[in-house]
Image (cartoon, rainbow, N blue to C red):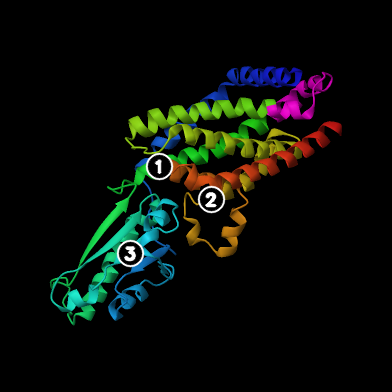
Amino acid sequence: MHKFSHILRLGLKELTSLRHDSVLLLFLLYAFTVAIYMPAAGSIIGVHNASVAIIDEDHSTLSRKLSESLLPPEFKTPHALPYDQLDQAMDKGLYTFVINLPANFQADLLAGRQPGVQLNVDATAMSQAFMGAGYIGQIFQRELLEYAGQTSLGAKAPALINSRPLFNPNLEGGWFLAVIQIVNNITILAIVLTGTALLREREHGTLDHLLVLPLTALEIMLAKIWSNMLVVVVCTWLSLEIIVKWALGVPLAGSLALFLIVTALYLFASTALGIFLATLARSTPQFGLLAIPVIIPMLLLSGGSTPLDSMPEWLQWVMQCSPSTHFVSLSAAILFRDAGIGVVWPDLLALTAIGLVFFAVALARFRKSLAS
């Protein structure tokens, strides 16, 4: 009970210290308002190494020809997918595009009918979905015209392509970008707030005062984690409600409560990382230099800016050790696809395991720094 009281009081001290730090408060305000709203208005879109699955119910020469027409570097080699796994694959975000070629597709085409090709697009993969759907449509139309023996681009198309973007029907670029900006800002603030809080106490000598009290390194560390976690979670909730949902008009379909719980779990891992970096640095400028090569890869390679499918396979495996990778996946699944625990539990479990490892390593390093 005494340990809990120590952790609570130390955390309140952290919140009081933050309340008097006008620079950090302004940075918090900027990070969860302007830094989210402005980038959401202009996203850069491109297609590279996009993941594709094909449900081939026709098994004809033409269906194989269409499958083989999707080539690198724009698309990966299409993966054969059974029809009954379509919804599950899209819900889990396994593929950016899932193409359904219906039964009797070639026969209907030869008979003069216009069979439909269904293109399912996971539009949360923002940088791929916008142009990728157009690319696939153009490629298929070209192949179908060639197969029908037509050479004029103005000729009547031998088949109709029915495109159905999921989770973002109007292909609004700012929707997903706004959420990713929140994810990125959470990563930055979690590391910066805890790291600077620890270094500020070291530089002001208050950390030495704490050491003469009946406090343990675990209590000091937990106090810093929960206080900064509380601040970021509250700012995240307000930003989602005011900036994302109200100002930008993004319809978040999933459970906001579940997302905030996942955010708190992610903060447990990332704040521990911030404390670890602070124990390596001797000053705030040095901490900034250490944080840059850690934060930037977490932002750029986590799957938010560019889907993991577009990265080399070895890099995809490496980034599975980063908590930001799983947090990006969880954010898209929960907020846009309305995924529940039954769908997101693998990423949730991985995030928990990474958080515990980061916390254990940071605690060991923190104890060592206090003893030196």
Residue placed under numbered mark 3 in the picture: 99
Residue placed under numbered mark 2 in the picture: 302
Measured along the vertical axis of the image, is residue 211 above or below residue 168?
A: above
First reached walking from the N terminus: tag 2 or tag 1: 2
Q: Residues within 10 Å of mark 3 (few under 14, many from 20)?
A: many
Q: Position of residue 294 (x, y in %)?
A: 63, 46
Image quadrant in which you'd find residue 219: top right
Left or right: where 84 falls relative to 8: left
Q: CA distance from mark 2 to mark 3?
A: 26 Å
The quarter of the rendered structure image containing the C terminus is top right
Measured along the vertical axis of the image, is residue 313 above or below residue 243?
A: below
For the point 48% across and 49% down, which residue is it? 304
Q: Secondary structure at mark 1?
A: loop
First reached walking from the N terminus: tag 2 or tag 3: 3
- Amino acid type indicated by mark 3: Ile
- Amino acid type indicated by mark 2: Ser
- Amino acid type indicated by mark 1: Asp
Measured along the vertical axis of the image, is residue 45 above or below residue 219?
A: below
The verdict on residue 335 being magenta is no
